[in-house]
Image (cartoon, rainbow, N blue to C red):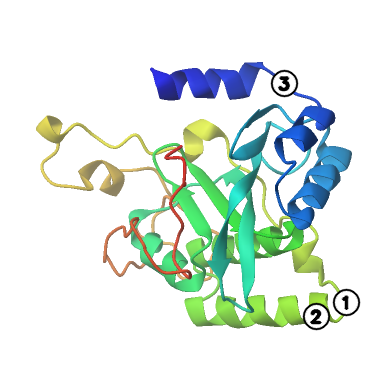
Amino acid sequence: MKKEALFCALLFMPITFATAQNTATDWDDAQKTLIQEMTTKYGEPDGETDSRIVWTNPEGEFEEIIIFRNKVDHDFPVAHKDYLEQAVYHNVPADKMDELAAFDGSIIVYRTEGRLAARCDKEGANILALNLAHDIIMNDKSVEQARQEYAQAVQQMMAGNTPEIMKSLAFESMAPAAASFSDVAAAQSGRPGQQEAAGAGRAGAQPGQDRSPADPQAPASDRGARQNQTTSDRPQSDPDNR
């Protein structure tokens, strides 16, 4: 009940920029600046707690934006702190979880809900990470190719020449119903993943083709989901168990 009450408070009690700034009084200057930037671009925040400022369903490309008080050390491609999370709806097959983890530990998959998020310190870096994660899911890039392109793009940004891949998403956020994966009750399942194996998709897709990310025929390493990671270059769990 406590968790549900928190969600309701975040969704239905909009706050002002002044309230958000007051909440972030003892946050880092970079976080305060980011709150102002996000407010200028997306409007007043929709909710806040002691540990986060939240925009739900903001105008634009993202389904949710969160600025966290707690910062996470991340050394790829250069040392920085992760505290800005931005999410879209995107189906992620189980066999792609390991690849996304190997690509960038700040890619976060809320698979049941159908959301794919990136957490960094800059919006451009999140856009870059989500674009490359999409390419991995669609078999358009390998993990190694995605990491190399990520590092090169960040180097260009730091040199004052932000590449197009960091400016906007190259795909559209999916409908929640199409992105989510409710799984199947254990009593009804012959084995784990049975429901997903029967899921919708365009059969016969080959690597590099524009296929549905739910395509059961896509080449898979079948290594399973690895959702509880611990290092600074693996998906970060929500510090508030959201």
Q: Position of residue 238 (x, y in %)?
A: 46, 46
Q: Nearer the viewer, residue 71 or 92?
A: 71
Q: Earlier in the sequence, mark 3 or mark 1?
A: 3
Q: Nearer the viewer, residue 74 or 189?
A: 74
Which residue carries the number 2 mark?
156
Question: The N terminus appears in which quarter of the rendering?
Answer: top left
Which residue carries the number 1 mark?
161
Estimate the spatial distance between the alpha carbons at disc 1 and disc 2, rounded to whole Å.
Answer: 5 Å
Residue 211 tag number: none
- Label 1 sits on a secondary structure element that is loop
Give yes or no for contact between labels 3 and 1 (Cβ–Cβ under 8 Å): no
Residue 65 in sight: yes
Residue at x 25% of width, y 41% of height: 195
- Label 3 sits on a secondary structure element that is loop
Type of the residue with mark 1: Asn
Residue at x 46% of width, y 57% of height: 236
Taking the image as shown, residue 235 lies to the left or right of residue 8, namely left
Taking the image as shown, residue 29 lies to the left or right of residue 12, namely right
Q: Quadrant of residue 219?
A: bottom left
Q: Position of residue 191 (x, y in %)?
A: 13, 46
